[in-house]
Amino acid sequence: MTEVHAATDADAAAIVASAVERARASLVGPGDWLTGAQRRAAWVEARDARTNELDQQRRAAISPNAVDGSHLATNDLSAAAVEVVHRMASDPGRLTRQWADEAMVDLGDATYTELVGVAATSATVDMFDWAMGDTDAPIGDAVDGEPAKVRPDSVGPVGAWVHQSLETTTANVSRSLSLVPVTNGPWVGLVDGLYSRGPGFFDMTWDRALSRPQVELVAARTTAELECFY
Amino acid sequence: MLLSVSGAQNGLDVDLEIAVDASRTGDAGVPYGEELLAFATEANRRSDSLPDAREALRAAVGHEGLLEAAATVAIFNGLVRVADGTGIQLDPSMVTSTVETREKLGIENFGGAANSIDASTQPRRTSTEPVKSLFD
């Protein structure tokens, strides 16, 4: 069970900073199936997607499949892994099950899910720094060590593209990375610290610096900008 | 949508169309909504107008409010990618309750809608114990 916070407004800044710092560290450390160097490389690729010519051409096309070309492998990542990170970073609203299934043939479902988590976590920490001060988050050096390589017992098919926890009683998004617990821990910490804050998630009239409707207004515009159905 | 629910519980008449359409202007019925929407749009686009939008929002809601807004933009950049990358379905409580809203706002046209065509509408939760967090 992941520890969650019951926050007051007074310590909101500290909670946010702590969650972001933990997430940043996780992006350069050993993960579930990827090394720290591989996760760090994925973070760098996610940033590159903002200006990468192939990604921009795909983004502008009526379908990303209408554009010829593919991403190349790097020293740390296979071509399939680079492809997943770039599509996650640049055009998440047009991912399809077929595309994901093809990626998982090459990568395996757990590594695919870990790359999704790395892309999402890096998008969050980079956007937080950018929103506050027009810079990306600092990327630390890769940390040596072996990936955990543990597949949880309590995951299975629940209607998503990847296996997830069979036990969740709340929102589907809360279990989306449950196949990769090392990646999921800092991710859950980010969601809790930057948004839900324990039982506060169920409080529609919370007492924070922004009211709940103000926060949800920002969330609605953000999800619309990224064309997210969920 | 939690914007509708929270708006109603706070006595606000929220305009969802303004909330999700950057080509529309207005505060969407939310206090300081214009500043919040401008900040969210410019941050997501990493535009040159972001510094001005940030300072306008800071002047409206203070530094702590700006921090909450930045945190919200940031985490939803991640949540969107996790949802779209893992292909999760709409939650049972949302499948039927948001049909009209999804159609009205054009959200059904987003690619991720395909994931929820056969989503269950049966409540998942059987316990009567109160839920303590999003991650129970």
Image: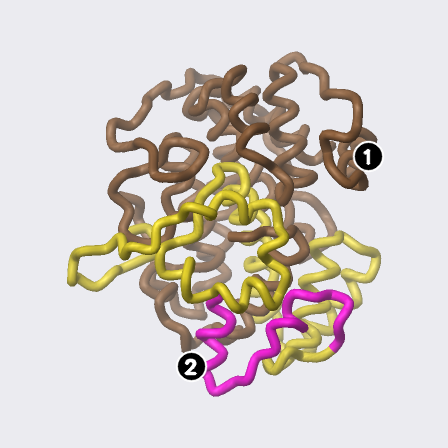
Chain colours: A brown, B yellow
Which residue lies at the image location 29% right of the left edge and 28% below the top edge? Answer: A152
Q: Is residue B18 above or below residue A114?
A: below
SS of the residue at dot 1?
Answer: helix
Which residue carries the number 2 mark?
B9
Which residue lies at the image location 16% right of the left edge and 61% below the top edge? Answer: B129
Pointers 1 and 2 within a single chain: no
For label 1, count other residues whose C-alpha is less than 10 Å away and answer few (under 14), some (14-19) or many (20+): some
The question of residue B21 being in magenta is answered with yes
Question: On what subunit does the disc labeled 1 rest?
Answer: A
Q: Does the rendering let one see residue A196? A: yes
Residue B97 pos. (x, y %):
42, 66
Which residue carries the number 1 mark?
A57
Q: Is residue A41 left or right of residue A109?
A: right
Residue B55 pos. (x, y %):
74, 70
Q: Residue furthest front?
A: B118
Mark 1 or 2, closer to the camera = 1
Q: Is residue A138 above or below residue B68?
A: above
- Start-end of magenta stretch: B1-25
Residue A171 pos. (x, y %):
37, 53
Q: Is residue B32 left or right of residue A113?
A: right
Q: Is residue B26 above or below residue A91?
A: below
SS of the residue at dot 2?
Answer: helix
Q: Quadrant of residue A37?
A: top right
Question: Label 2 sits on what residue type?
Answer: Gln
Which residue lies at the image location 73% right of the left edge and 34% below the top edge? Answer: A64
The CA span between labels 1 and 2 is 44 Å
The question of residue B112 being in magenta is answered with no
Question: On what subunit does the disc labeled 2 rest?
Answer: B
Q: Is residue B66 above or below residue A185?
A: below
Report the front residue among B68 and A60: A60
